[in-house]
Amino acid sequence: MPQRTDIFDLGRLGLSSGEGRRLDLHTGLGPFHYGGQAYAVEPELIPVRLDVSRTTASGYALRLRFGVALSGPCMRCLEPANPSFEVDAREVHQPTGGEELVSPYINADEELDLAGWTRDALALELPAQLTCREDCLGLCGQCGANLNEDPEHTHEAAPDARWAKLSELKFD
Ligand SMILES: [Zn+2]
Ligand SMILES: [Zn+2]
């Protein structure tokens, strides 16, 4: 089992201005909640690639890359969905100097909240709906049938007697 890193101490790298380092680490997110549903994150221990560059004496430019799959209900048809995502996120941390840019993921002790950043970067990558497939047809609004299994599914336009009466009314 690779070691899990949730907090990474950037200062320990001892980089000086202009130096960089590529690190292959593993972090974990636990269950991920989206649209009111819980999704399992696969793999449980996520391999992440972290590129760290020391820009100035106190600044960093970071890049985080990873791929995960989420597992849970399709938001349209409720069948199991297993969409996967490739995430490529960047972060600049420049706490001193002319333009102050403080990353919310790096604290005053130069510790990087790797798990927190991974979680947020994934959330930003997600579409509005997690679906079993991109063109999931969802459920029939009238009877709840799964339209992926029955794309030709239609209902007879059964005019309700009350509505028929209404349509006879004239508003003038
Ligand atoms: Zn679906
Ligand atoms: Zn139907």
Image (cartoon, rainbow, N blue to C red):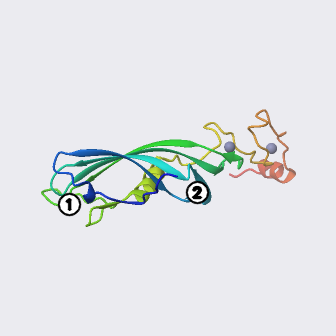
Residue 69 is left or right of residue 21, and the answer is: right
Residue 77: x percent and y percent?
70, 46
Vertical position of residue 85 compared to residue 91: above or below: above
Spot the residue most to the bottom: 108
Q: Which mark is residue 49?
A: none
Question: In the figure, is residue 59 to the left or right of 88?
Answer: left
Residue designated by label 1? 95
> Which mark's residue is nearer the viewer, 1 or 2?
1
Q: Quadrant of residue 36?
A: bottom right
Residue placed under numbered mark 2 in the picture: 35
- Of 44 and 84, nearer the camera is 44
Can you name the residue that lies furthest to the left here? 98
Residue 115 pos. (x, y %): 43, 58
Distance from Cα at disc 1 to Cα at disc 2: 35 Å
Q: Amino acid at mark 2?
A: Gly
Residue at the location (74% across, 48% down)? 141
Label 1 SS: loop
Q: Earlier in the sequence, mark 1 or mark 2?
A: 2
5 relative to 73 in the view: left or right? left
Ligand 1 found in image quarter? top right
Q: In the image, is residue 29 above or below residue 47?
A: below
- Count the numbered circles shown: 2
Q: What's under tag 1, amino acid-wise? A: Pro
Say whether marks 1 and 2 touch (CB < 8 Å). Answer: no
The quadrant holding residue 9 is bottom left
Left or right: where 110 falls relative to 28: left
